[in-house]
Image: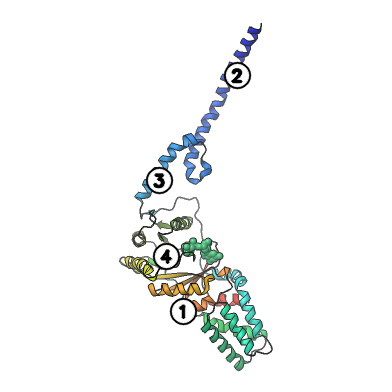
Amino acid sequence: MTTYIILIVVIAVLVLGVAGTMLLRPRGMHGVRRGRAGQLDLSSGPSATVDRDTATAPSDQASESAQQVASAQQFAPSQPQARPTLEKPPPSAGRMLRLRARLARSQSGFGSALLSLLSRDRLDDDTWDEVEEVLITADVGVMPARQIVSDLKMKMKVEGARTPDDVRAMLRSELLVQVSTEASRELRTQRHEGRPAVVLVVGVNGTGKTTTCGKLARSLVGDGETVLLGAADTFRAAAADQLQTWGERVGAQVVRSDKEGADPASVAFDAVATGIEQEVDVVLIDTAGRLHTKNDLMDELGKVKRVVEKRTAVDEVLLVLDATTGQNGLRQARVFAEVVDVTGIVLTKLDGTAKGGIVIAVQRELGVPVKLVGLGEGPDDLAPFDPATFVDAILGG
Ligand code: GDP
């Protein structure tokens, strides 16, 4: 009897086992397929490593072929990956007005301090010293601060402005005079003589150079131009990837070298050659900003410029300066200006400092206009510089 029961149990287990296997098989196949999908997805992140055993070999193949593609594409333009929808950035016009609140938040301390000093009943020497001090603290620079004080003293004497509105109007017009320059702030980014405009973006690492290239590319695309980016900052490993991400978002090609430390001039040359061939409107070149010595910089940047000029003219050399670095930034600006002909200044991080007076100081120092300002880390937080909007933001008007 016991033997009979054991026999029945064994048969039942066998029957259940077979049925179980048959039921589970489709799920097992599905699992493999998911594993494959996971392998294809490996590039999208470590979380996609679903089935380790099956994923390993193809993943190695994938990285091998990726390496082959990468080496075959040395200096080759990386086509923007097909994306369902490219971003459509807003045009550049009116951006500074849109970002004015951010500017006013950071700069109004300096403006309101000036307004309250100038509205005192008695403007004695001590008060004028305080005005000068506020200006110097806001990085306007010693000479321009003295000039502003002397102009305001004179105007007060002649015009006798006393109402708050009079004082504001007088200060506004004086600051506008100081911020304005004769030189045009227009960016030369139009194709000419059948060739793309070429813009070199230079500056010390950390100032926001690569971010500025990316933001500028977006803004130009927003204005209807076709843009090619050259990743000639080959000394900072992440710079080319950073640029590629910016480019992909708006459909701008990026010419780069996958070799760290590759010759920046070769990358720049190749970017311009590709831009000419592909008939883009603008080639933007991000350069390396290693400021060991002036000679190093001269060798590097000078060579990039010379090599590019073998193919076409360089239309703009934009110097990126971090507005939060004050006097140190001005020193950097001087060195760069001695090495290349800077045609415009990009002041970044104006949202992060109350020292907007640097606009006046740097223009005076280099004799070159501020053409663009960075007002945040967002992709569209780069604006063409507009003196009136800037001064109004300072005065909170
Ligand atoms: P690079 O080394 O000069 O190429 O500097 P990056 O472009 O990598 O920028 C350095 C940092 O500055 C990044 O965190 C940027 O997001 C930040 N940055 C750039 N421009 C601005 C700006 O206008 N405002 C603020 N707040 N941050 C900025």
Going by the numbered disc 1, the residue's amino acid type is Glu
Q: Residue furthest left?
A: 310
Residue 32 point in image, percent of width and height: 50, 33
Number of labels in the image equals: 4
Q: Are marks 4 and 1 in contact (CB under 8 Å)?
A: no
Q: First in sequence: mark 3 or mark 2?
A: 2
Question: Taking the image as drawn, is residue 177 in sight?
Answer: no
> Which secondary structure, mark 4?
loop
Residue where numbered disc 3 is placed: 66
Q: Residue furthest bottom?
A: 158
Q: First in sequence: mark 2 or mark 4?
A: 2
Which numbered circle lies on residue 290? 4
Going by the numbered disc 4, the residue's amino acid type is Arg
Q: Are marks 1 and 2 in contact (CB under 8 Å)?
A: no
Residue 186 point in image, percent of width and height: 45, 73
Q: Nearer the viewer, residue 387 or 277?
A: 387
How far apart are labels 1 and 2 at the CA level?
Answer: 88 Å
Q: Comparing marks 1 and 2, which lies closer to the viewer?
A: 1
Q: First in sequence: mark 3 or mark 4?
A: 3
